[in-house]
Image (cartoon, rainbow, N blue to C red):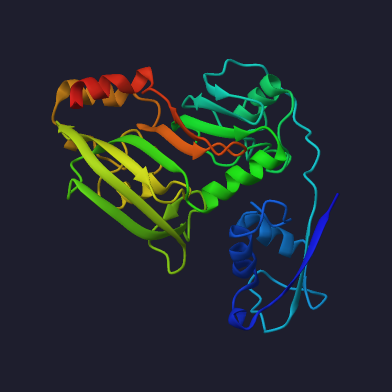
Amino acid sequence: MTATLQLDAPADATGVRLDRFLAARAAVAAPDSALFGVSRARLQRLIVDGLVTVAGAKVRPSYKLRPGEQVRVSVPAPEPLDLTPEPMPLSILYEDEHLIAVDKPAGLSVHPGAGRKTGTLVHALLAHCKDLSGIGGKERPGIVHRLDKDTSGVVVVAKHDRAHRLLAAQFALRQVKKTYVAFVFGVPLPKAATIETVIGRHPSDRKRFTTKVRRGRSAVTHYQVVASKGGISRVLIDLGTGRTHQIRVHFSERGHPVVGDPVYGGRQWRRVTDPALRKVAERLNRQALHALSLGINHPISGVPLLFEAPLPAELRPLTDLVG
């Protein structure tokens, strides 16, 4: 069933892009609103698909509003799922009737995408949970955030639409606490700081992201160097935002790429002066980045929850040597 609502553009929305106007409304929407928990990316898709009109006409996401214009938004019900459940072992950190938190291993994609149609975390969750929220799209049921394929750690997934909307709102409003551990080349200076930039797609390589863009999305990374030895540092990271490849881009563009990163790593091995450490690092078949913990409020009860995933076995030797 499609939910529809109408909004009148106020005077202070003059000249504001339509997609930004709707994203701002979605961020403060009540739980029973059709806009509640809807991301800007999804709003842009609705606009392109003609499900958002201004004064009865189809427009672009970049359309600049005028005072008093009537904006009509139609939000379709979630598409039926067409994925086949695939039983596979899951490391479950928490589960109830509303959500599930798992410790995702490196090498496992969160959801289907280009070149990956089976064998994802979504397929495994469909086998385990039997029924997931479809609001994230037919290939991303229940998914409110994600990790890169070769990043391990905590992922939380909603089991029904209300939980999905409430969790998505927490992520959109930056009300979650996301902590990562990374092993990077060199010693980032200062040893405790905040990196604040914009991030966007690389102009010539659509698989990469970069801070060297004229326009992008705000990206905030707080970090602290915990230990350093032989050319590698262990860094504890709190994310202020969760942009795609954010940590990897921020550290790479400051000359300290994540160890084992095949995309942003570059030729850094000459910086590793400890032979034992270099031997361990070169054995990695993944980037040395792990989502250590995720703090949220339970979407239904409101009780604070903290999910923690221990460092995986393949990264522990780095801790033993670096400290």
Residue nearest the observer in this picture, 304 or 188? 304
Residue 249, given in percent of the width and then of the height, sits at 37, 49
**Which residue is located at x 77 percent, y 61 percent?**
49
Quarter occupied by the C terminus? top left
Q: Quadrant of residue 181?
A: top left
Query: Where does residue 101 sit, x and y in percent of width and height?
Result: 54, 28
**208 horizontally vs 50: left or right:** left
Report the label total: 0
Left or right for 84, reference 218? right
Q: Is residue 123 above or below residue 79?
A: above
Residue 223 on image: x %, y % = 28, 45
Looking at the image, the residue that sits furthest to the right is: 1
Asked if residue 156 is positioned above or below residue 170 in the image, the reply reads: above
The residue at the point 16 percent across, 23 percent down is 275
Residue 211 in view, yes or no? yes
Q: Is residue 273 left or right of residue 10?
A: left
Q: Which image quarter: residue 285? A: top left
Question: Which quadrant of the view contains residue 56?
Answer: bottom right
Taking the image as shown, residue 154 lies to the left or right of residue 97, namely left
For the residue pair 167 and 233, the one nearer the viewer reads as 167
Q: Residue, x 62% and y 16% (percent of image)?
A: 88
Picture coordinates of residue 191 (x, y %)?
A: 18, 45
Task: Say if residue 261 shows up in the picture.
Answer: no
